Image (cartoon, rainbow, N blue to C red):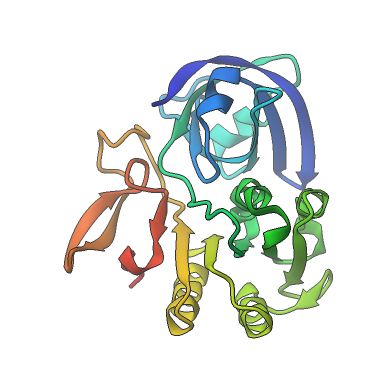
Amino acid sequence: MYKQGKYQIVSKKTLAKGIFDIEVLCPDVAELAEAGQFAQVAAEGFFLRRPISICDIDKDKGTIRLVFEIRGKGTEKLAELNKGQLIDIIAPLGKGFKVMEGKKAICVGGGIGVPPMVGIAKAYGKNAVAISGFRNMAAVILQEDFKAAGVETILWTDDGSAGRKGFVTDALEEQIAKEKPDIIVACGPMVMLKRIADIAEKNGIECQVSLEQRMACGVGACLVCACRTVKDGKEIHSHVCKDGPVFDSKEVVFE
């Protein structure tokens, strides 16, 4: 079930160059939303909506947070919206992450794949480890959100300008060697997700990945966001918007 409406923006922040954090007052959406779902957001003057992951949900306040990066004219238009204005969204859409009560999770995000990790890491709280990877220090976002939730927070950058130098997959293998989790959840570039899926399978750990894909309708009516998956031993095409964006990593055809 999802809602469509125009909702008030109650706060707006610039997290890094070209990356914005918008908090939206939408109690009916917040009540339904789960970590890992997304919103289809209308940009004035553009026919197609833009898919944006739900970064965080506050059911008590009735708000959701949308963190997005300017990647074109549509998201550039969305970045012009300010506190007090209305934003037109359809949400919550798609399938979210699994929450395993009392179990331990490692949440891995790469670049703009870090925002979807905030909500799921908070759901696991002290039982979560958040591993984030960015190009450099200037691109680092949301680390304080993980820490405020009591989540062990690990930061790596490609150039070593913040945290440790290297890739999140290296950090993941290090963490697994220290303590094997019950589940790994991840979002980021496909090459990163493939490597994480391989690590999870090698170590016998359940793994869920959130796929980023271009979309049109957002509700499974078109074929724009089709991806290759395996069900019952057969390769099929699934819709990222409706069947995902969260998939069991063993179901995804990464090649």
Percent across and percent down for residue 80 are 69, 26
2 or 7, which lies in front?
Answer: 2
137 or 239, which lies in front?
Answer: 239
171 or 207, which lies in front?
Answer: 207
Query: As drawn, is 205 to the left or to the right of 141?
Result: left
Whether residue 192 appears in this view of the structure is yes
Percent across and percent down for residue 231 are 21, 61
Q: Quadrant of the C terminus?
A: bottom left
- On screen, residue 81 above or below 13: above
Image-quadrant location for residue 95: top left
Number of numbered markers: 0
Percent across and percent down for residue 68 are 63, 42
Q: Residue at x 40, y 66 (%)?
A: 249
Q: Residue at x 64, y 73 (%)?
A: 168
- On screen, residue 2 above or below 193: above
Percent across and percent down for residue 27 are 60, 19
Query: As drawn, is 33 to the left or to the right of 131?
Result: left
Q: Residue at x 58, y 35 (%)?
A: 75
Whether residue 43 appears in this view of the structure is no
Q: Residue at x 76, y 29 (%)?
A: 12
Q: Quadrant of the N terminus?
A: top left
